[in-house]
Amino acid sequence: MARKENIPEPLRILIAENDTVIAMDLREALESLGHRVIGEAPTGVEALRLARELKPDLLLGFHGKPPVVRSTHTLVCRL
């Protein structure tokens, strides 16, 4: 079935969160919106490793405050 033009394609998302309950809730919420969570990382170092390996559309991280949302295109440029 073709997607309607005004509905964006699902994002492939990597979650960087050290609290497993929060990560699980984020995964559930994102997947309920039609996105695909391709990985979870408990540390920034692991998030960078997985970002290089999995090449997500979006890296969603909550290390520190405020929450950080970065496109992996920006992330990869800084590596």
Image (cartoon, rainbow, N blue to C red):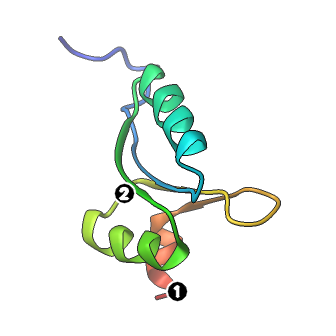
The alpha-carbon separation of the residues under discs 1 and 2 comes to: 15 Å
Eyeballing the image, is 1 above or below 77?
A: above
Q: Secondary structure at mark 1?
A: loop
Q: Position of residue 23 (x, y in %)?
A: 53, 44
Q: Nearer the viewer, residue 63 or 54?
A: 63
Q: Identify the residue at image location x=55%, y=37%.
A: 26
Return the mark for residue 17.
Answer: none
> Is 60 situated left or right of 72 in this image?
right
Above-or-below relation of 44 to 13: below
Q: Which residue is mark 2?
A: 56
Image coords of residue 38 (percent x, y): 32, 48
Report whether 22 appears left or right of 14.
Answer: right
Q: Is residue 65 or residue 69 the one in the foreground?
A: 65
Characterize the local packing of mark 2: few (<14), some (14-19) or many (20 or more) Cα atoms within 10 angstroms.
many
Farthest left residue?
1
Amino acid type for the residue under numbered disc 2: Pro
Seen in the image, is 75 located left or right of residue 70?
left
In the rendered image, the quadrant that contains the N terminus is: top left
Q: Residues within 10 Å of mark 1 (few under 14, many from 20)?
A: few
Is 5 drawn above or below residue 61 in the view shown?
above
Q: Is residue 16 left or right of residue 66?
A: left
Q: Position of residue 12 (x, y in %)?
A: 36, 45
Three-letter code, disc 1:
Arg
- Disc 2 element: loop
For the point 48% across and 80% down, the residue is 45
* Total numbered circles: 2
Q: Is residue 60 above or below residue 35?
A: below
Which image quadrant for residue 14?
A: bottom left
Q: Which residue is mark 1?
A: 78
The residue located at (60%, 42%) in the rendering is: 22
